[in-house]
């Protein structure tokens, strides 16, 4: 499952109305599986409190909940949040109780400071005028000793529109105070993704994992 601000060719749009329409016109936008970089980086973390920024239909939040995390999952699509909550109910009361679904616009919403042991933003592509401020609010929400995980698309045949919406792990790392953070991972990772007609195409993720010093 990918949480990106676009799918396929064309211009990326990041606004509530566009995403609500996308979710309404498709029975499911994502696979329901957790994003691979979240699985790679969070599988070994001690469960605590997690913030899933841009949670979509809930695959990441429910994966975390299934591993003992208490999750605040935030998205500005009410359709996506309703689907996620319904899936949590299908998984049983423990999953439902472990996730709080929050309807909010992350370009304005501020999470509680130092409240989360993990803050995850997967394919959270924002317009440049919103990006640094939003990432700063997410970083501020990480508790001492906690982790910030930011994953984005690198431009590719599948992700070619609106180049200003893309970022690198190095750009995000540069916004963090080096006196307060240790950068654990800062790299691009190649993989493949399903393209038109189901054919596999090469893509790459840019991955930042940083840990706030205790």
Image: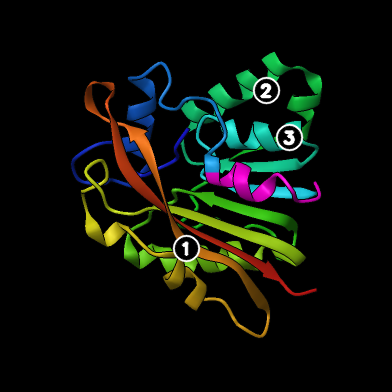
Q: Is residue 76 left or right of residue 45?
A: left
In this view of the protein, which residue sits in the foreground, 147 or 5? 147
Q: Is residue 103 visible?
A: no
Under circle 3, the secondary element is: helix
The Cα–Cα distance between marks 1 and 2, rounded to whole angstroms, is 33 Å
Q: Nearer the viewer, mark 1 or mark 2?
A: 1
Instruction: Tell me whether circle 2 and circle 3 mark residues in contact (CB < 8 Å).
Output: yes
Image location of residue 57, percent across then percent down: 52, 29
Left or right: 75 with respect to 125?
right
Residue 205 image point, x, y percent: 42, 51
Could you tell me which quadrant the C terminus lies in?
Answer: bottom right
Q: Which residue is mark 3?
A: 65
Q: Which residues are magenta?
A: 37-47
Q: Earlier in the sequence, mark 2 or mark 3?
A: 3
Q: To which quarter of the image does residue 212 belong?
A: bottom right
Where does residue 97 sit, x and y in percent of width and height? Answer: 79, 29
As measured in the structure, the alpha-carbon distance from the residue carrying label 2 to the one carrying label 3 is: 9 Å
Looking at the picture, tell me which residue is in the foreground, 186 or 163: 186
Label ID, residue 88: 2
Q: Is residue 72 above or below residue 173?
A: above
Q: Residue at x 58, y 26 (%)?
A: 84
Q: How was this image coloured? A: rainbow
Q: How far is mark 3 from mark 1, CA to CA?
A: 27 Å
Q: Is residue 53 left or right of residue 100?
A: left
- Categorize mark 1 by other alpha carbons within 10 Å: few (<14), some (14-19), many (20+): some
Residue at the disc numbered 1:
187
Residue 204, placed above or below residue 134? above
């Amino acid at each position: 499952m990918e949480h990106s601000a676009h799918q396929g060719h064309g211009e990326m749009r990041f606004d509530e109305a566009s995403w609500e329409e996308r979710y309404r016109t498709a029975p499911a936008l994502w696979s329901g599986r957790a994003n691979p970089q979240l699985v790679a980086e969070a599988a070994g973390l001690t469960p605590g409190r997690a913030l899933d920024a841009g949670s979509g239909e809930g695959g990441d939040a429910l994966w975390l909940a299934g591993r003992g995390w208490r999750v605040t999952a935030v998205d500005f699509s009410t359709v996506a949040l309703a689907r996620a909550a319904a899936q949590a109910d299908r998984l049983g009361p423990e999953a439902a109780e472990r996730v709080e679904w929050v309807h909010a616009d992350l370009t304005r919403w501020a999470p509680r400071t130092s409240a989360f042991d993990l803050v995850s933003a997967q394919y959270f592509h924002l317009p440049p005028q919103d990006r640094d401020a939003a990432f700063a609010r997410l970083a501020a929400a990480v508790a001492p000793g906690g982790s910030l995980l930011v994953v984005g698309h690198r431009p590719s045949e599948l992700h070619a529109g609106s180049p200003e919406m893309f970022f690198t792990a190095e750009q995000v790392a540069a916004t963090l105070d080096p006196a307060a953070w240790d950068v654990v991972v800062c790299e691009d990772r190649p993989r493949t993704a399903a393209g038109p007609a189901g054919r596999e195409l090469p893509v790459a993720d840019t991955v930042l994992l940083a840990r706030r010093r205790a």
